[in-house]
Amino acid sequence: MTSTLVAGSKPRDALCPAAEPWHQPVHENPAFSCLKGAARVLMLQGPVGPFFDRLAGWLQARGCKVERIVFQGGDEHDCQSVRPMRFRAAPAEWPAYISELLQSQRPDCILLFGQGRSYHKVALERARAMDLPVVVTEEGYFRPGYVTMELGGVNGYSTTLERFEWAGAEDRALHPSISPMHFQKMAWHASQHYVALDKRRRQYPHYEHHRSTHAPSYALYWTRSWLRKGLHRGTDGKLQHWLVATGQPYYFVPLQLEGDSQVTQHSSYASVSQFVTQVLHSFARHAPAGSLLVFRQHPHARGGPGHQGLIRSLARSLGASGRIFHLVEGDTPVLAQHSLGTVLINSTVGLQALERGSPLIVLGDAPYKRPALTFTGPLDAFWSERAPPDPEAAGRFLAQVKNLTQAPASVYALRNEPLPWVSSLVPAPPKLQMADR
């Protein structure tokens, strides 16, 4: 893309490094570089809560003009630092709306959270066609304490590790920013967001959400979640202690959320239940005698039906009930570290397993699905032929991931908690002036 520039301004590729050449050496997260160098940023939907407002404040303090589109009442509730543009039309009108807006506004960068949302998919397509950089954010690959921040896509759509290479020291300290009471704050922001969405539904009659928006259902779900957490904390803690302290030979299977886009869009599985069924059948037929299989439910799945019933039923039918366990609670990194191996679809738990040297097999698509890091054979062979990741390769890979894709930030911190990106970290950019604006 070419632009007419006034004297003293920078071309766009100076703000956001281009895709070529691949493995371009950089000294900071390329998406972060894009944000810090932008003079004009367009925000779409963020996570529930004030994170995008906190980020907008950081950008504005650097002289950046920030604009934001809201799609429903929850977005509007969360957006208090800038005057939002309200998209109230039917989804069919969104492609033309965003195309016209991008043509007229020509932002240096688009910022969004969650690449799988229907509105965001369209925005990504239009931005690519216009050669506009898009910073995609998600909860951190290492969490809590980090936000994932990549150019063009995250998880299965990420190309960061192919496009860029970390040129700094591999042991650079990238410290997490962990806000106290992380889960409680997330629940509070979510409740406020969905109450506002419900109250202002008439103002956004055509909005289509990426999941259920029924506020009472969410309240019931999280109430059930906390009750189950209390009920299982003691018994599951004792089971984990027994597994680890006595050196039981077990394989670890961290489960993901049903309906998660990482499962539906970045794996061959139609559901987590299908994955559970395959793992149980393979374990019963091919795992060494005397070994155990330990499932850990996703923490955000506590309020739903989960997979405990399916696991018990299949274990019984396979004649393996005494060897298969299901945990609602548990320390995931510890369980991965002390296991014979970890089996997953594409969860961020895979990175924790790599950090701790646990043999790992990935049955979906993930950036860390690489020969030196994971078992590349079939699942049936993993139980006996597994091997730990190469320590040097894992160390290099994790350094690349942390420095190229992560930024220290508590996504669900309170509104008055500043982002830990001090001005001394990066110099303020010169103000850019585009002649065609």
Image (spheres, rainbow, N blue to C red):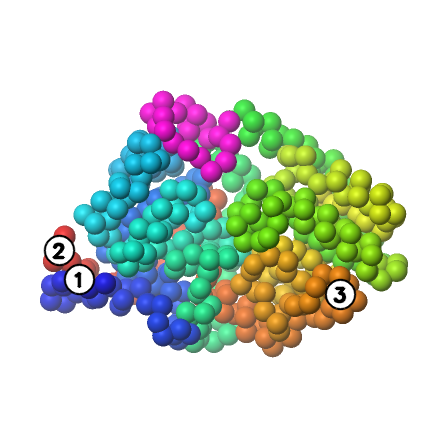
Residue 146 position, x and y percent, is 49, 55
Q: Which residues are magenta?
A: 194-214
Q: Is residue 430 left or right of residue 207?
A: left
Callout 1: few (<14), some (14-19), or many (20+) C-alpha neighbours within 10 Å? Answer: few
Q: Report the residue at 72% width, 61% height from top.
A: 379
Q: Report the residue at 58% width, 49% height from top.
A: 263
Q: Is residue 224 visible?
A: yes
Q: Report the residue at 44% width, 73% height from top.
A: 166
Residue 304 position, x and y percent, is 64, 34
Residue identifier under label 2? 436
Q: Is residue 224 left or right of residue 13?
A: right
> Which mark lies nearer to you, 3 or 1?
3
Q: Is residue 413 visible?
A: no
Residue identifier under label 3? 381
- The numbered mark at residue 3 is 1
Callout 1 secondary element? loop
Callout 2: few (<14), some (14-19), or many (20+) C-alpha neighbours within 10 Å? Answer: few
Callout 2 secondary element? loop
**What is the three-letter code of the residue carrying label 2?**
Asp
The image quadrant that residue 28 belongs to is bottom left
**Nearest to N terminus: mark 3 or mark 2:** 3
Q: Are marks 2 and 1 in contact (CB under 8 Å)?
A: yes
